[in-house]
Amino acid sequence: MISKKTGNLHLVRCKVLLDKFYWLITQDKKQFLSLQLIQIVYELMYLMAKYLIIKEKIKINYNLHNDNLGEVLPIINYIKENYQEPLTVKSIGEKFYLSENALSKSFKKNIGISVMKYVQLLRVNQAQLLLLDSEKSIATISCLAGFPNEKSFRKIFEDVFHQTPKKYQLDHLKK
């Protein structure tokens, strides 16, 4: 959850930018005005997006829409409900009476990524939420998110977020 202090800092920065925006448009000097205004608008958009991502904890798979999932929706729901379990393409396929090949092809066609990549991203997303909401150890979070071990969790997390889970946790707990 976003802290009150961080939220207030974002609001203060937004107010400063809006004041600067107003000051610029009320000036007689029009040289580079459009560039300055565009810069302020982009900075405001960045602040709002950053604030919303932290506040709402936007999930990695936010762009998946149920109407585009077709036959894999039950599989996705199963993975979401069982991500903490040791999942494999074979075990998921058996659950839905599909061969590994058929499951892989269908999933890739409908989602655009492999079954196991989806499982990894879902687990990383769950770990991200735990990192943002707690001061639990990385080993505990790794286990709660369904990773087989802490090493695999660290590797996948770093691939997605380009920083270690601990650094990510510390950076966001400060805010």
Image (cartoon, rainbow, N blue to C red):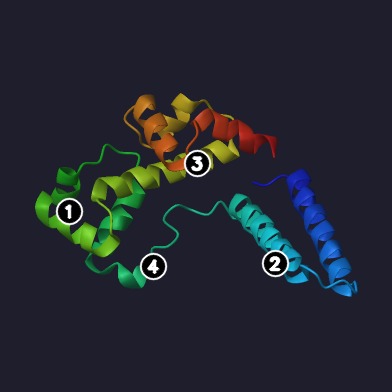
For the point 90% across and 71% down, the residue is 27
> Label 1, label 2: how many angstroms apart (C-alpha)?
45 Å
Q: Are marks 1 and 2 in contact (CB under 8 Å)?
A: no
Q: Position of residue 89 (x, y in %)?
A: 18, 45
Sequence-wise, the earlier of marks 4 and 2 is: 2
Q: Are marks 3 and 2 in contact (CB under 8 Å)?
A: no
Q: Dot 4 corresponds to which residue?
A: 65
Q: Disc 1 vs disc 2: which is toward the camera?
A: 2
Type of amino acid under label 4: His
* Crowd band around label 1 with a 10 angstrom C-alpha radius: few (<14), some (14–19), many (20+): some
> Label 3, label 1: how many angstroms apart (C-alpha)?
26 Å
Type of amino acid under label 3: Gln
> Label 4, label 2: how many angstroms apart (C-alpha)?
32 Å
Q: Dot 3 corresponds to which residue?
A: 128
Type of amino acid under label 1: Ser
Q: Disc 3 vs disc 2: which is toward the camera?
A: 2
> Label 4, label 3: how many angstroms apart (C-alpha)?
21 Å
Sequence-wise, the earlier of marks 4 and 3 is: 4
Q: Position of residue 171 (x, y in %)?
A: 62, 35
> Label 4, label 1: how many angstroms apart (C-alpha)?
19 Å
Q: Position of residue 141 (x, y in %)?
A: 46, 32
Q: Position of residue 110 (x, y in %)?
A: 25, 64
Sequence-wise, the earlier of marks 1 and 2 is: 2
Residue 98's image quarter? bottom left
Q: Which mark is residue 38?
A: 2
Q: For numbered disc 3, what is the local secondary structure?
A: helix
Is residue 99 among the parts visible in the rendering?
Answer: no
